[in-house]
Image: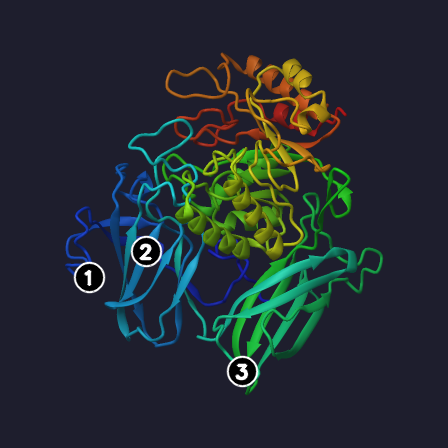
Amino acid sequence: MKNIERKNHPRPQFVRENWISLDGEWQFAFDDENQGLKNKWYQGLKNSQLIQVPFTYETELSGIHDSEHHYVVWYQKNFEVNELENLVLNFEGVDYRCQVWLNGECIGSHQGAYERFSFDLESYLVAGENTIIVRVEDSLACEQPRGKQRWLKDNFGCWYVQTTGIWKSVWLEEAASQRLRRVKLTPDLDNDQIIIEPVLQDNAVRLETKPYEIAFEISYEGQFVRSYQGSLTHEMTPIVLDTRITEDACWGTKVWSPETPRLYDLTCRLYDAENQLIDEVYSYFGMRKIAIEQGQILLNNRQLYQRLILDQGYWQESGITPPSVKDLEVDVDRILEMGYNGVRKHQKIEDERFLYLCDSKGLLVWSEMAATYNFNDLAITNFTEEWLKIVEQNYNHPSIITWVPFNESWGIKDIDRNRQQQHFTESIYHLTKAFDTQRPVITNDGWVHTISDIITLHDYEELGEVFATRYQDKDSLMNNQQQFNNDFYALAEGYAYRGQPIIISEFGGIAFSSESGWGYGNQVQNEEVFMKRFDSIHKAIQKLPYSVGYCYTQLTDVEQEINGLLDVNRQAKVDLNKVREINLRRLK
Protein backbone atom coordinates (compact mmCIF):
# COMPACT_ATOMS: atom_id res chain seq x y z
CA MET A 1 0.00 0.00 0.00
CA LYS A 2 1.10 3.56 -0.71
CA ASN A 3 2.22 5.74 2.18
CA ILE A 4 -1.04 7.63 2.71
CA GLU A 5 -1.12 10.47 5.27
CA ARG A 6 -4.44 9.83 7.00
CA LYS A 7 -4.31 12.08 10.03
CA ASN A 8 -4.86 15.30 8.10
CA HIS A 9 -7.28 13.93 5.52
CA PRO A 10 -10.91 15.00 6.17
CA ARG A 11 -12.06 11.40 5.63
CA PRO A 12 -9.18 9.21 6.84
CA GLN A 13 -11.16 5.98 6.54
CA PHE A 14 -11.69 6.37 2.78
CA VAL A 15 -8.82 8.19 1.06
CA ARG A 16 -8.25 8.91 -2.61
CA GLU A 17 -4.80 10.07 -3.60
CA ASN A 18 -5.71 13.31 -5.39
CA TRP A 19 -7.56 15.78 -3.20
CA ILE A 20 -7.33 19.41 -2.16
CA SER A 21 -8.70 21.25 0.85
CA LEU A 22 -10.98 24.24 0.32
CA ASP A 23 -10.69 25.29 3.96
CA GLY A 24 -9.54 28.83 4.48
CA GLU A 25 -10.77 32.17 3.21
CA TRP A 26 -14.27 32.36 1.69
CA GLN A 27 -16.61 35.24 0.90
CA PHE A 28 -19.53 35.42 3.33
CA ALA A 29 -22.79 37.35 3.69
CA PHE A 30 -25.72 37.48 6.09
CA ASP A 31 -29.16 37.40 4.47
CA ASP A 32 -31.39 38.52 7.34
CA GLU A 33 -34.14 39.71 4.98
CA ASN A 34 -33.97 36.45 2.97
CA GLN A 35 -33.56 38.31 -0.29
CA GLY A 36 -30.61 36.35 -1.66
CA LEU A 37 -32.59 33.94 -3.82
CA LYS A 38 -34.77 36.72 -5.22
CA ASN A 39 -31.68 38.81 -6.00
CA LYS A 40 -29.79 35.83 -7.48
CA TRP A 41 -26.88 35.81 -5.06
CA TYR A 42 -26.10 32.34 -6.40
CA GLN A 43 -24.62 34.11 -9.41
CA GLY A 44 -22.09 35.82 -7.14
CA LEU A 45 -22.05 37.65 -3.81
CA LYS A 46 -21.95 41.42 -4.36
CA ASN A 47 -21.62 42.66 -0.78
CA SER A 48 -19.64 40.26 1.34
CA GLN A 49 -17.01 39.94 4.02
CA LEU A 50 -14.35 37.32 4.61
CA ILE A 51 -14.77 34.23 6.77
CA GLN A 52 -12.34 31.46 7.63
CA VAL A 53 -13.98 28.12 6.81
CA PRO A 54 -14.72 25.75 8.53
CA PHE A 55 -15.26 28.07 11.51
CA THR A 56 -18.79 29.42 11.82
CA TYR A 57 -19.50 33.13 12.03
CA GLU A 58 -20.29 32.78 15.75
CA THR A 59 -16.68 31.92 16.55
CA GLU A 60 -13.52 33.93 17.01
CA LEU A 61 -11.49 31.90 14.51
CA SER A 62 -14.02 32.67 11.76
CA GLY A 63 -12.85 36.27 11.80
CA ILE A 64 -16.43 37.52 12.38
CA HIS A 65 -17.33 36.47 15.96
CA ASP A 66 -21.02 37.41 15.99
CA SER A 67 -22.96 35.28 18.49
CA GLU A 68 -26.39 36.51 17.36
CA HIS A 69 -28.49 34.03 15.42
CA HIS A 70 -28.90 34.67 11.67
CA TYR A 71 -31.37 32.46 9.84
CA VAL A 72 -29.79 32.60 6.36
CA VAL A 73 -26.12 32.93 5.41
CA TRP A 74 -24.24 32.65 2.10
CA TYR A 75 -20.72 31.54 1.18
CA GLN A 76 -18.63 31.88 -1.98
CA LYS A 77 -15.36 30.21 -2.94
CA ASN A 78 -13.45 30.42 -6.23
CA PHE A 79 -11.05 27.73 -7.41
CA GLU A 80 -9.05 27.04 -10.57
CA VAL A 81 -9.33 24.00 -12.84
CA ASN A 82 -6.75 23.38 -15.55
CA GLU A 83 -8.11 20.09 -16.89
CA LEU A 84 -11.76 19.08 -16.88
CA GLU A 85 -11.36 15.89 -14.88
CA ASN A 86 -14.28 14.81 -12.73
CA LEU A 87 -14.11 16.42 -9.32
CA VAL A 88 -16.25 15.63 -6.29
CA LEU A 89 -17.12 18.42 -3.87
CA ASN A 90 -17.30 17.14 -0.29
CA PHE A 91 -18.84 18.83 2.75
CA GLU A 92 -18.07 17.15 6.05
CA GLY A 93 -20.74 19.10 7.95
CA VAL A 94 -23.09 22.03 7.30
CA ASP A 95 -25.67 23.10 9.87
CA TYR A 96 -28.53 22.80 8.89
CA ARG A 97 -30.09 23.09 5.38
CA CYS A 98 -28.08 24.12 2.38
CA GLN A 99 -28.24 24.62 -1.37
CA VAL A 100 -25.10 24.55 -3.50
CA TRP A 101 -24.42 26.20 -6.88
CA LEU A 102 -21.42 25.87 -9.18
CA ASN A 103 -20.97 28.59 -11.78
CA GLY A 104 -24.57 29.68 -11.26
CA GLU A 105 -26.08 26.20 -11.69
CA CYS A 106 -27.75 24.52 -8.73
CA ILE A 107 -26.00 21.18 -8.19
CA GLY A 108 -27.93 19.97 -5.16
CA SER A 109 -29.16 20.48 -1.63
CA HIS A 110 -28.82 18.79 1.74
CA GLN A 111 -30.41 18.73 5.18
CA GLY A 112 -28.68 17.62 8.37
CA ALA A 113 -25.91 19.11 10.48
CA TYR A 114 -23.74 16.18 11.44
CA GLU A 115 -23.14 13.88 8.47
CA ARG A 116 -21.14 14.44 5.29
CA PHE A 117 -22.47 14.82 1.75
CA SER A 118 -21.01 15.37 -1.70
CA PHE A 119 -21.76 16.49 -5.27
CA ASP A 120 -20.26 15.48 -8.62
CA LEU A 121 -19.02 18.56 -10.48
CA GLU A 122 -18.19 17.06 -13.89
CA SER A 123 -21.20 18.51 -15.74
CA TYR A 124 -20.72 22.01 -14.32
CA LEU A 125 -16.96 22.61 -14.41
CA VAL A 126 -15.30 25.06 -16.78
CA ALA A 127 -11.63 25.45 -17.61
CA GLY A 128 -10.15 28.23 -15.50
CA GLU A 129 -11.95 29.83 -12.57
CA ASN A 130 -14.99 28.15 -11.03
CA THR A 131 -17.26 29.56 -8.34
CA ILE A 132 -19.00 27.66 -5.54
CA ILE A 133 -21.94 29.36 -3.83
CA VAL A 134 -23.54 27.89 -0.71
CA ARG A 135 -26.76 29.11 0.90
CA VAL A 136 -27.46 27.86 4.44
CA GLU A 137 -30.62 28.04 6.53
CA ASP A 138 -30.45 27.32 10.24
CA SER A 139 -33.48 27.81 12.46
CA LEU A 140 -33.87 27.68 16.22
CA ALA A 141 -36.43 24.91 15.83
CA CYS A 142 -36.31 22.12 18.39
CA GLU A 143 -37.42 19.60 15.76
CA GLN A 144 -33.95 19.57 14.22
CA PRO A 145 -31.14 17.67 15.99
CA ARG A 146 -29.44 20.42 18.00
CA GLY A 147 -27.32 18.70 20.61
CA LYS A 148 -25.98 21.33 23.01
CA GLN A 149 -26.77 24.28 20.70
CA ARG A 150 -29.05 26.82 22.38
CA TRP A 151 -32.44 27.75 20.91
CA LEU A 152 -32.88 30.82 23.08
CA LYS A 153 -31.11 34.15 22.69
CA ASP A 154 -28.63 33.55 25.49
CA ASN A 155 -26.83 30.55 26.95
CA PHE A 156 -28.69 28.67 29.67
CA GLY A 157 -28.11 25.55 31.75
CA CYS A 158 -25.79 23.31 29.76
CA TRP A 159 -26.70 24.74 26.34
CA TYR A 160 -24.27 26.95 24.48
CA VAL A 161 -23.88 29.26 21.49
CA GLN A 162 -25.49 27.86 18.35
CA THR A 163 -23.55 26.67 15.29
CA THR A 164 -24.66 27.99 11.89
CA GLY A 165 -23.36 27.05 8.45
CA ILE A 166 -20.19 25.28 7.37
CA TRP A 167 -18.52 23.87 10.49
CA LYS A 168 -16.46 21.00 9.12
CA SER A 169 -13.97 20.79 6.27
CA VAL A 170 -14.82 21.35 2.60
CA TRP A 171 -12.66 19.61 0.03
CA LEU A 172 -12.34 18.44 -3.56
CA GLU A 173 -11.19 15.05 -4.72
CA GLU A 174 -10.57 13.60 -8.14
CA ALA A 175 -12.84 10.60 -8.73
CA ALA A 176 -14.74 9.00 -11.60
CA SER A 177 -18.49 9.47 -11.79
CA GLN A 178 -18.86 5.72 -11.25
CA ARG A 179 -16.81 4.89 -8.20
CA LEU A 180 -16.95 3.24 -4.82
CA ARG A 181 -19.33 5.17 -2.58
CA ARG A 182 -18.45 3.19 0.51
CA VAL A 183 -17.17 -0.18 1.64
CA LYS A 184 -18.76 -1.70 4.74
CA LEU A 185 -16.16 -3.54 6.82
CA THR A 186 -17.28 -6.02 9.47
CA PRO A 187 -14.67 -7.87 11.53
CA ASP A 188 -15.38 -11.51 12.39
CA LEU A 189 -12.66 -12.06 14.95
CA ASP A 190 -13.70 -15.55 16.04
CA ASN A 191 -13.21 -16.82 12.50
CA ASP A 192 -10.19 -14.63 11.62
CA GLN A 193 -12.09 -12.92 8.81
CA ILE A 194 -13.02 -9.48 7.57
CA ILE A 195 -16.33 -9.17 5.70
CA ILE A 196 -16.20 -6.57 2.92
CA GLU A 197 -19.39 -5.25 1.31
CA PRO A 198 -18.84 -2.70 -1.52
CA VAL A 199 -21.37 -0.07 -2.62
CA LEU A 200 -21.11 1.90 -5.88
CA GLN A 201 -21.81 5.60 -6.31
CA ASP A 202 -24.40 5.06 -9.05
CA ASN A 203 -27.02 2.89 -7.37
CA ALA A 204 -29.05 2.68 -10.59
CA VAL A 205 -26.33 0.85 -12.52
CA ARG A 206 -27.33 -2.56 -13.90
CA LEU A 207 -24.39 -4.66 -12.84
CA GLU A 208 -25.63 -7.70 -14.70
CA THR A 209 -25.47 -5.78 -18.01
CA LYS A 210 -22.48 -3.56 -17.20
CA PRO A 211 -19.98 -5.70 -15.31
CA TYR A 212 -17.30 -4.33 -13.04
CA GLU A 213 -14.32 -5.97 -11.43
CA ILE A 214 -13.60 -5.35 -7.77
CA ALA A 215 -10.27 -5.97 -6.04
CA PHE A 216 -9.12 -5.76 -2.43
CA GLU A 217 -5.66 -6.07 -0.95
CA ILE A 218 -4.99 -6.35 2.80
CA SER A 219 -1.64 -5.60 4.38
CA TYR A 220 -0.37 -5.17 7.90
CA GLU A 221 2.57 -2.83 8.63
CA GLY A 222 3.59 -3.10 4.98
CA GLN A 223 3.37 -6.89 4.88
CA PHE A 224 0.99 -8.45 2.37
CA VAL A 225 -1.78 -10.48 4.04
CA ARG A 226 -4.51 -11.36 1.55
CA SER A 227 -6.07 -10.24 -1.75
CA TYR A 228 -9.20 -10.77 -3.82
CA GLN A 229 -10.34 -9.92 -7.33
CA GLY A 230 -13.60 -10.87 -8.97
CA SER A 231 -16.75 -9.70 -10.73
CA LEU A 232 -19.00 -7.27 -8.89
CA THR A 233 -22.43 -8.62 -9.79
CA HIS A 234 -24.44 -7.29 -6.87
CA GLU A 235 -23.76 -4.44 -4.49
CA MET A 236 -23.04 -5.44 -0.90
CA THR A 237 -22.30 -9.04 -1.84
CA PRO A 238 -20.11 -10.12 1.09
CA ILE A 239 -16.48 -10.78 0.23
CA VAL A 240 -14.78 -12.67 3.05
CA LEU A 241 -11.02 -12.54 3.49
CA ASP A 242 -8.78 -14.28 6.00
CA THR A 243 -6.90 -11.88 8.32
CA ARG A 244 -4.33 -14.29 9.72
CA ILE A 245 -0.69 -13.39 9.21
CA THR A 246 0.82 -16.50 7.70
CA GLU A 247 4.30 -15.78 9.08
CA ASP A 248 2.85 -15.49 12.58
CA ALA A 249 1.22 -18.87 13.06
CA CYS A 250 1.21 -18.49 16.83
CA TRP A 251 -1.09 -15.46 16.99
CA GLY A 252 -2.61 -15.32 13.51
CA THR A 253 -4.91 -12.30 13.37
CA LYS A 254 -3.60 -9.01 14.74
CA VAL A 255 -6.22 -7.99 17.28
CA TRP A 256 -7.32 -4.39 17.92
CA SER A 257 -7.72 -3.32 21.56
CA PRO A 258 -6.95 -0.22 23.67
CA GLU A 259 -3.66 -1.88 24.69
CA THR A 260 -2.80 -2.94 21.13
CA PRO A 261 -4.57 -0.68 18.60
CA ARG A 262 -3.44 -2.67 15.58
CA LEU A 263 -4.82 -1.58 12.21
CA TYR A 264 -4.80 -3.42 8.90
CA ASP A 265 -4.47 -1.44 5.66
CA LEU A 266 -6.98 -2.08 2.89
CA THR A 267 -6.64 -1.00 -0.73
CA CYS A 268 -9.86 -1.06 -2.79
CA ARG A 269 -9.86 -0.96 -6.58
CA LEU A 270 -12.70 -0.79 -9.10
CA TYR A 271 -12.21 -1.78 -12.77
CA ASP A 272 -14.51 -1.29 -15.75
CA ALA A 273 -15.52 -3.93 -18.33
CA GLU A 274 -12.25 -3.33 -20.23
CA ASN A 275 -10.25 -3.95 -17.05
CA GLN A 276 -9.28 -0.29 -16.79
CA LEU A 277 -8.76 1.00 -13.24
CA ILE A 278 -11.45 3.62 -12.57
CA ASP A 279 -11.20 4.02 -8.80
CA GLU A 280 -8.65 3.35 -6.07
CA VAL A 281 -9.36 3.98 -2.40
CA TYR A 282 -7.21 3.45 0.69
CA SER A 283 -8.88 2.35 3.90
CA TYR A 284 -8.13 0.45 7.09
CA PHE A 285 -9.86 -1.69 9.69
CA GLY A 286 -9.36 -3.16 13.14
CA MET A 287 -10.11 -6.73 14.12
CA ARG A 288 -12.07 -6.61 17.34
CA LYS A 289 -15.26 -8.09 18.76
CA ILE A 290 -17.91 -6.51 20.99
CA ALA A 291 -20.35 -8.78 22.79
CA ILE A 292 -22.60 -8.89 25.84
CA GLU A 293 -22.88 -12.05 27.92
CA GLN A 294 -24.29 -12.62 31.41
CA GLY A 295 -24.33 -8.99 32.42
CA GLN A 296 -20.81 -8.30 31.14
CA ILE A 297 -19.49 -6.36 28.15
CA LEU A 298 -16.81 -8.36 26.36
CA LEU A 299 -14.10 -6.97 24.15
CA ASN A 300 -12.39 -9.71 22.17
CA ASN A 301 -14.08 -12.32 24.39
CA ARG A 302 -12.68 -10.82 27.59
CA GLN A 303 -14.51 -8.76 30.22
CA LEU A 304 -14.16 -5.05 29.60
CA TYR A 305 -14.30 -2.53 32.42
CA GLN A 306 -14.90 0.87 30.86
CA ARG A 307 -13.29 3.99 32.30
CA LEU A 308 -14.83 6.71 30.19
CA ILE A 309 -14.78 10.48 30.28
CA LEU A 310 -17.52 12.67 28.83
CA ASP A 311 -16.25 15.02 26.12
CA GLN A 312 -18.37 17.69 24.44
CA GLY A 313 -15.74 18.72 21.90
CA TYR A 314 -15.92 22.51 22.42
CA TRP A 315 -13.15 25.05 22.08
CA GLN A 316 -13.31 28.63 23.33
CA GLU A 317 -12.19 30.17 20.05
CA SER A 318 -13.95 27.83 17.62
CA GLY A 319 -17.07 26.32 19.20
CA ILE A 320 -17.69 22.74 18.10
CA THR A 321 -15.16 22.94 15.25
CA PRO A 322 -11.71 21.68 16.30
CA PRO A 323 -9.11 24.44 15.77
CA SER A 324 -6.78 21.86 14.20
CA VAL A 325 -5.97 18.16 14.07
CA LYS A 326 -3.24 18.86 16.59
CA ASP A 327 -5.90 20.08 19.03
CA LEU A 328 -7.84 16.86 18.57
CA GLU A 329 -4.69 14.88 19.25
CA VAL A 330 -4.04 16.85 22.44
CA ASP A 331 -7.47 15.82 23.72
CA VAL A 332 -6.98 12.14 22.90
CA ASP A 333 -3.52 12.10 24.47
CA ARG A 334 -4.74 13.85 27.62
CA ILE A 335 -7.60 11.36 28.02
CA LEU A 336 -5.20 8.43 27.77
CA GLU A 337 -2.71 10.16 30.07
CA MET A 338 -5.38 10.33 32.79
CA GLY A 339 -5.95 6.57 32.70
CA TYR A 340 -9.25 6.53 30.81
CA ASN A 341 -9.71 3.84 28.16
CA GLY A 342 -12.66 5.49 26.44
CA VAL A 343 -14.62 8.64 25.71
CA ARG A 344 -18.31 9.37 25.49
CA LYS A 345 -18.53 12.02 22.74
CA HIS A 346 -21.54 13.89 24.08
CA GLN A 347 -24.32 15.27 21.83
CA LYS A 348 -22.05 15.65 18.83
CA ILE A 349 -20.72 13.75 15.83
CA GLU A 350 -17.06 14.68 15.91
CA ASP A 351 -14.67 15.36 13.05
CA GLU A 352 -13.72 11.96 11.61
CA ARG A 353 -10.04 12.69 12.19
CA PHE A 354 -10.83 12.39 15.89
CA LEU A 355 -12.10 8.86 15.27
CA TYR A 356 -8.96 8.02 13.32
CA LEU A 357 -6.86 9.18 16.27
CA CYS A 358 -8.95 7.00 18.58
CA ASP A 359 -8.57 4.07 16.17
CA SER A 360 -4.81 4.46 15.98
CA LYS A 361 -4.16 5.26 19.66
CA GLY A 362 -6.62 2.78 21.19
CA LEU A 363 -9.35 4.95 22.73
CA LEU A 364 -12.84 3.45 22.94
CA VAL A 365 -15.71 5.67 21.78
CA TRP A 366 -19.40 5.93 22.58
CA SER A 367 -20.95 7.71 19.59
CA GLU A 368 -23.91 9.82 20.70
CA MET A 369 -26.50 11.60 18.56
CA ALA A 370 -27.40 15.27 18.94
CA ALA A 371 -30.85 15.54 20.51
CA THR A 372 -34.02 17.16 19.28
CA TYR A 373 -36.12 18.85 21.97
CA ASN A 374 -39.67 18.52 20.65
CA PHE A 375 -41.51 15.34 19.86
CA ASN A 376 -43.62 15.30 16.70
CA ASP A 377 -43.61 13.81 13.21
CA LEU A 378 -41.07 16.33 11.94
CA ALA A 379 -38.63 15.63 14.76
CA ILE A 380 -39.01 11.88 14.25
CA THR A 381 -38.23 12.19 10.54
CA ASN A 382 -35.30 14.57 10.96
CA PHE A 383 -33.73 12.48 13.72
CA THR A 384 -34.17 9.09 12.05
CA GLU A 385 -32.83 10.09 8.64
CA GLU A 386 -29.74 11.77 10.05
CA TRP A 387 -28.98 9.10 12.65
CA LEU A 388 -28.99 6.26 10.12
CA LYS A 389 -26.61 8.20 7.85
CA ILE A 390 -24.27 8.74 10.78
CA VAL A 391 -24.26 5.05 11.70
CA GLU A 392 -23.48 4.19 8.08
CA GLN A 393 -20.78 6.87 7.86
CA ASN A 394 -18.85 5.84 10.97
CA TYR A 395 -19.57 2.11 11.02
CA ASN A 396 -16.04 1.04 10.04
CA HIS A 397 -14.22 2.70 12.95
CA PRO A 398 -13.05 0.00 15.39
CA SER A 399 -12.85 2.50 18.25
CA ILE A 400 -16.63 3.00 18.23
CA ILE A 401 -18.03 0.29 20.48
CA THR A 402 -21.42 1.74 21.49
CA TRP A 403 -24.20 3.73 19.80
CA VAL A 404 -26.13 6.22 21.94
CA PRO A 405 -29.08 7.69 20.03
CA PHE A 406 -30.89 9.23 23.05
CA ASN A 407 -29.82 10.98 26.26
CA GLU A 408 -31.77 11.82 29.42
CA SER A 409 -35.21 11.91 27.74
CA TRP A 410 -34.22 14.96 25.65
CA GLY A 411 -36.78 15.17 22.86
CA ILE A 412 -38.72 12.29 24.42
CA LYS A 413 -39.60 13.86 27.76
CA ASP A 414 -42.62 11.62 28.43
CA ILE A 415 -40.93 8.35 27.55
CA ASP A 416 -41.63 6.97 31.01
CA ARG A 417 -45.30 6.40 30.11
CA ASN A 418 -45.89 7.66 26.57
CA ARG A 419 -46.18 4.65 24.24
CA GLN A 420 -45.64 6.77 21.11
CA GLN A 421 -42.27 7.95 22.41
CA GLN A 422 -41.42 4.46 23.59
CA HIS A 423 -42.21 3.09 20.13
CA PHE A 424 -39.90 5.72 18.64
CA THR A 425 -36.93 4.63 20.77
CA GLU A 426 -37.69 0.99 20.00
CA SER A 427 -37.71 1.73 16.28
CA ILE A 428 -34.36 3.54 16.42
CA TYR A 429 -32.92 0.68 18.46
CA HIS A 430 -34.07 -1.95 15.95
CA LEU A 431 -33.05 0.09 12.88
CA THR A 432 -29.58 0.55 14.36
CA LYS A 433 -29.29 -3.14 15.23
CA ALA A 434 -30.47 -4.09 11.73
CA PHE A 435 -27.59 -2.10 10.25
CA ASP A 436 -25.05 -3.02 12.92
CA THR A 437 -25.55 -6.41 14.55
CA GLN A 438 -22.43 -6.18 16.71
CA ARG A 439 -22.35 -2.96 18.74
CA PRO A 440 -24.57 -2.41 21.78
CA VAL A 441 -27.20 0.34 21.54
CA ILE A 442 -28.25 2.44 24.54
CA THR A 443 -31.71 3.99 24.44
CA ASN A 444 -32.19 6.99 26.69
CA ASP A 445 -28.80 7.06 28.36
CA GLY A 446 -29.23 7.98 32.02
CA TRP A 447 -32.61 6.64 33.11
CA VAL A 448 -36.07 5.27 32.12
CA HIS A 449 -34.72 2.94 29.45
CA THR A 450 -36.97 1.11 27.01
CA ILE A 451 -35.13 -1.51 24.95
CA SER A 452 -31.43 -1.13 25.69
CA ASP A 453 -28.38 -3.38 25.51
CA ILE A 454 -26.82 -1.57 28.49
CA ILE A 455 -28.53 0.05 31.48
CA THR A 456 -26.88 3.40 32.17
CA LEU A 457 -27.45 5.58 35.23
CA HIS A 458 -26.66 9.27 35.75
CA ASP A 459 -26.15 10.51 39.29
CA TYR A 460 -24.23 13.59 40.44
CA GLU A 461 -24.26 12.71 44.14
CA GLU A 462 -21.29 14.39 45.84
CA LEU A 463 -20.65 11.99 48.71
CA GLY A 464 -19.22 8.56 48.10
CA GLU A 465 -20.81 7.03 51.19
CA VAL A 466 -24.28 8.29 50.18
CA PHE A 467 -23.76 6.96 46.65
CA ALA A 468 -22.67 3.56 47.96
CA THR A 469 -25.74 3.26 50.15
CA ARG A 470 -28.09 4.32 47.37
CA TYR A 471 -26.77 1.69 44.97
CA GLN A 472 -26.19 -1.24 47.29
CA ASP A 473 -29.48 -2.95 46.36
CA LYS A 474 -29.24 -3.74 42.66
CA ASP A 475 -32.56 -5.62 42.52
CA SER A 476 -34.47 -2.71 44.03
CA LEU A 477 -33.04 -0.32 41.43
CA MET A 478 -33.53 -2.61 38.46
CA ASN A 479 -37.09 -3.57 39.44
CA ASN A 480 -38.10 0.11 39.68
CA GLN A 481 -38.75 -0.21 43.40
CA GLN A 482 -36.21 2.52 44.12
CA GLN A 483 -35.57 5.89 42.48
CA PHE A 484 -32.16 7.46 42.02
CA ASN A 485 -30.86 10.92 41.13
CA ASN A 486 -33.84 12.49 42.95
CA ASP A 487 -36.81 11.15 41.00
CA PHE A 488 -35.84 8.77 38.20
CA TYR A 489 -36.32 5.06 37.69
CA ALA A 490 -33.98 2.83 35.71
CA LEU A 491 -36.65 1.59 33.31
CA ALA A 492 -39.66 3.07 31.59
CA GLU A 493 -43.11 1.85 32.51
CA GLY A 494 -43.86 -1.51 30.91
CA TYR A 495 -40.22 -2.60 30.60
CA ALA A 496 -38.33 -5.09 32.72
CA TYR A 497 -34.66 -5.58 33.53
CA ARG A 498 -33.27 -8.52 31.55
CA GLY A 499 -29.79 -8.89 32.96
CA GLN A 500 -28.09 -6.15 30.93
CA PRO A 501 -24.71 -4.74 31.98
CA ILE A 502 -24.96 -1.64 34.20
CA ILE A 503 -22.74 1.43 33.85
CA ILE A 504 -22.74 4.71 35.80
CA SER A 505 -22.48 6.82 32.66
CA GLU A 506 -22.56 10.33 34.19
CA PHE A 507 -21.30 11.43 37.59
CA GLY A 508 -18.87 13.84 39.19
CA GLY A 509 -18.94 17.22 37.47
CA ILE A 510 -16.90 18.84 40.26
CA ALA A 511 -16.19 22.56 39.81
CA PHE A 512 -13.88 24.98 41.57
CA SER A 513 -15.46 28.07 43.13
CA SER A 514 -16.60 30.61 40.57
CA GLU A 515 -19.08 33.48 40.47
CA SER A 516 -19.90 33.05 36.79
CA GLY A 517 -19.75 29.31 36.06
CA TRP A 518 -21.30 26.17 37.46
CA GLY A 519 -20.67 22.52 38.17
CA TYR A 520 -22.65 19.79 39.88
CA GLY A 521 -23.25 20.05 43.61
CA ASN A 522 -21.21 22.33 45.84
CA GLN A 523 -18.20 24.03 44.33
CA VAL A 524 -14.84 23.33 45.96
CA GLN A 525 -12.22 25.79 47.18
CA ASN A 526 -8.96 24.02 46.37
CA GLU A 527 -7.36 20.98 44.77
CA GLU A 528 -7.15 19.04 48.01
CA VAL A 529 -10.93 19.19 48.50
CA PHE A 530 -11.47 18.45 44.81
CA MET A 531 -9.35 15.31 44.85
CA LYS A 532 -10.85 14.07 48.12
CA ARG A 533 -14.34 14.25 46.61
CA PHE A 534 -13.12 12.84 43.27
CA ASP A 535 -11.48 9.91 45.06
CA SER A 536 -14.50 9.22 47.27
CA ILE A 537 -17.10 9.05 44.51
CA HIS A 538 -14.84 6.96 42.27
CA LYS A 539 -14.19 4.53 45.09
CA ALA A 540 -17.92 4.09 45.65
CA ILE A 541 -18.50 3.31 41.96
CA GLN A 542 -15.43 1.11 41.56
CA LYS A 543 -16.57 -1.03 44.49
CA LEU A 544 -20.04 -1.62 43.05
CA PRO A 545 -20.00 -5.37 42.30
CA TYR A 546 -22.52 -5.14 39.45
CA SER A 547 -21.20 -2.06 37.65
CA VAL A 548 -19.03 -2.72 34.60
CA GLY A 549 -17.77 0.82 34.13
CA TYR A 550 -18.31 4.53 34.50
CA CYS A 551 -18.14 7.84 32.66
CA TYR A 552 -16.89 10.93 34.50
CA THR A 553 -18.17 14.42 33.64
CA GLN A 554 -16.10 15.91 32.05
CA LEU A 555 -12.91 16.47 30.07
CA THR A 556 -12.90 20.27 29.70
CA ASP A 557 -14.78 23.35 30.78
CA VAL A 558 -17.39 24.43 28.22
CA GLU A 559 -18.50 28.07 28.24
CA GLN A 560 -20.49 28.53 31.48
CA GLU A 561 -20.06 24.87 32.52
CA ILE A 562 -16.77 24.79 34.44
CA ASN A 563 -16.60 21.19 35.68
CA GLY A 564 -13.79 19.93 33.46
CA LEU A 565 -10.59 18.28 34.60
CA LEU A 566 -9.00 20.62 32.07
CA ASP A 567 -9.89 24.26 31.53
CA VAL A 568 -11.03 25.66 28.17
CA ASN A 569 -7.40 25.98 27.08
CA ARG A 570 -6.72 22.31 27.90
CA GLN A 571 -4.61 23.15 30.94
CA ALA A 572 -4.88 20.73 33.85
CA LYS A 573 -6.81 22.02 36.86
CA VAL A 574 -5.64 19.16 39.12
CA ASP A 575 -2.76 16.70 39.27
CA LEU A 576 -3.46 14.35 36.37
CA ASN A 577 -1.19 11.68 37.81
CA LYS A 578 -3.55 11.41 40.79
CA VAL A 579 -6.50 11.14 38.39
CA ARG A 580 -4.68 8.34 36.59
CA GLU A 581 -3.94 6.45 39.81
CA ILE A 582 -7.60 6.57 40.83
CA ASN A 583 -8.78 5.43 37.41
CA LEU A 584 -6.40 2.49 37.21
CA ARG A 585 -7.05 0.99 40.61
CA ARG A 586 -9.46 -1.91 40.99
CA LEU A 587 -11.36 -2.22 44.25
CA LYS A 588 -13.98 -4.92 43.60
Res 246 quadrant in image: bottom right
Under circle 1, the secondary element is: loop
Are the residues tagged 2 and 3 within 8 Å (C-beta)? no
Res. 44 mark = 1
Q: Position of residue 301 (x, y in %)?
A: 77, 47
| SS at circle 2 | strand
Q: CA distance from mark 2 to mark 3?
A: 34 Å
The structure residue drawn at horizontal position 49% and vertical position 24%, both measured from the top left corner, is 563
Q: Tell me: 123 left or right of 11.
A: left
Gap in Å between the C-alphas at discs 2 and 1? 16 Å
Which residue reaches farthest right?
A: 250
Q: Is residue 520 above or below residue 345?
A: above
For marks 1 and 3, the one nearer the N-term is 1
Read off the residue under disc 2: 98
Dot placed on the residue nearer the N-terminal end, 2 or 1: 1
Q: Helix or strand or loop: what does disc 3 sit on?
A: loop
User: Residue 368, position in %: x, y?
Assistant: 53, 43
Is residue 84 depicted above or below 462 in this figure? below
Image quarter of the N terminus = bottom right
Kind of residue indicated by mark 2: Cys
Q: Amino acid at mark 3?
A: Asp
Does residue 250 appear to the left or right of 372 in the view shown? right
Mark 3, residue position: 272
Q: Name which residue type carries label 1.
A: Gly
Residue at screen point 55% across, 16% down? 530
- Kindly report which numbered mark, 2 or 3, lies closer to the viewer in this rendering: 2
